[in-house]
Image (spheres, rainbow, N blue to C red):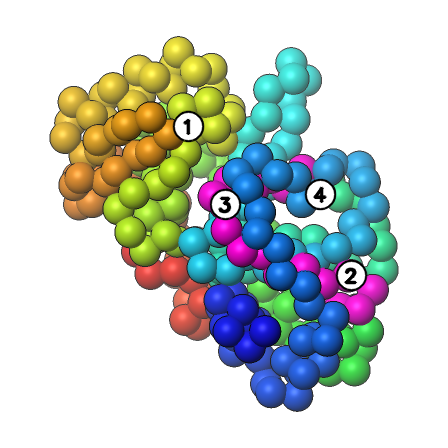
């Protein structure tokens, strides 16, 4: 279990006594892409910590039925009742974007641990501030930046968390993350290929030119990374 806890940066830096409060309640799950961690409107009974290259996205459903990701959470964070005081309904659906290992703890057990440890409560409150900042920045990004810029941003977010150049994701999944139709995202992917920054094969994106991809991306990821570094130094995956 110690090795599993180390896979999530947010909890890996907790004090030993706080780790000991959480460990008996943690369970390890191997999750697949598309698995649902929580549904909008459901009471949040579980808190999930992605490990390693695993990634989840908070997606919000629009009036016409489409969904768009407003935040992604990897090994720097958590999904679920991280700062709430008791069971409350989820506003957004949380869906696994990159498969991998997740740690799960019942929200009630996490709440008890936070009651017993003021440093843990403060630490998770700081993370909440960072997650809100990411949602605010994402809202501004969706309103102000082109689909090409946002596509580059999400690919970089995936690369930073996988610590590699290959990202397992279908075009359908990518379109859902961006909140656009598949024909539109296909044109964006073709542009990125033509610019020589990515290569693709079925279900996989490969970053060929990281510097070129960063040049096409908006500055939103850097803005969030800087905020994380100020509030939770060393937690956000390096870009």
The answer to whether residue 199 is left or right of residue 125 is left
Quadrant of the image containing the N terminus: bottom right
Quick one: label 2, few (<14), some, or many (20+) residues within 10 Å? Answer: many
Residue 153 appears in the picture as rendered: no
Residue nearer the viewer, 154 or 162: 162
**Measuring 40% from the left and 24% from the top, which residue is drawn there?**
171
Quick one: label 3, few (<14), some, or many (20+) residues within 10 Å? Answer: some
Query: Which residue, given by chain and number where applicable, does mark 4 sit on?
Result: 38
Q: Is residue 103 above or below residue 151?
A: below
Closer to us: mark 2 or mark 3? 3
**Mark 2 → mark 4, Cα distance in angstroms:** 12 Å
| Sequence-wise first label, 1 or 3 | 3
Q: Position of residue 23 (x, y in %)?
A: 67, 76
**Mark 1 → mark 3, Cα distance in angstroms:** 13 Å
**Measuring 58% from the left and 47% from the top, which residue is drawn there?**
31
Total numbered badges shown on the rendered structure: 4
**Mark 2 → mark 1, Cα distance in angstroms:** 32 Å
Query: Which residue, given by chain and number where applicable, does mark 1 sit on?
Result: 170
Q: Which residue range is magenta in the image? A: 93-111
Q: Is residue 156 magenta?
A: no
Quadrant of the image containing the C terminus: bottom left
Closer to us: mark 4 or mark 3? 3
Residue nearer the viewer, 57 or 162: 162
The circle drawn on residue 99 is 3
Q: Main secondary structure of the magenta part?
A: strand
Query: Which residue, given by chain and number where applicable, does mark 2 sit on?
Result: 107
Closer to us: mark 4 or mark 1? 1
Q: Are marks 2 and 4 in contact (CB under 8 Å)?
A: no
């Amino acid at each position: 279990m110690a090795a599993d806890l180390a896979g999530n940066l947010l909890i890996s830096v907790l004090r030993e006594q706080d780790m000991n409060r959480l460990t008996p309640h943690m369970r390890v799950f191997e999750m697949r892409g598309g698995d649902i961690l929580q549904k909008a409107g459901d009471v949040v009974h579980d808190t999930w910590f992605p490990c390693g290259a695993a990634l989840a996205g908070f997606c919000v459903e629009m009036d016409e039925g489409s969904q768009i990701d407003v935040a992604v959470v990897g090994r720097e964070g958590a999904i679920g009742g991280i700062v709430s005081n008791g069971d409350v309904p989820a506003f957004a659906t949380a869906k696994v974007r990159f498969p991998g290992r997740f740690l799960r703890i019942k929200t009630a057990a996490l709440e008890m641990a936070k009651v017993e440890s003021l440093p843990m409560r403060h630490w998770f409150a700081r993370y909440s501030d960072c997650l809100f900042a990411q949602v605010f920045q994402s809202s501004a990004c969706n309103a102000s930046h082109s689909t090409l810029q946002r596509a580059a941003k999400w690919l970089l977010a995936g690369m930073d968390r996988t610590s590699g150049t290959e990202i397992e994701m279908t075009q359908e999944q990518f379109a859902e993350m961006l909140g656009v139709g598949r024909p539109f995202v296909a044109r964006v992917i073709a542009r990125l290929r033509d610019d020589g920054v990515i290569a693709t094969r079925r279900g996989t994106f490969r970053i060929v030119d990281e510097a070129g991809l960063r040049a096409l991306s908006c500055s939103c990821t850097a803005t969030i990374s800087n905020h994380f570094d100020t509030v939770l130094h060393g937690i956000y995956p390096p870009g």
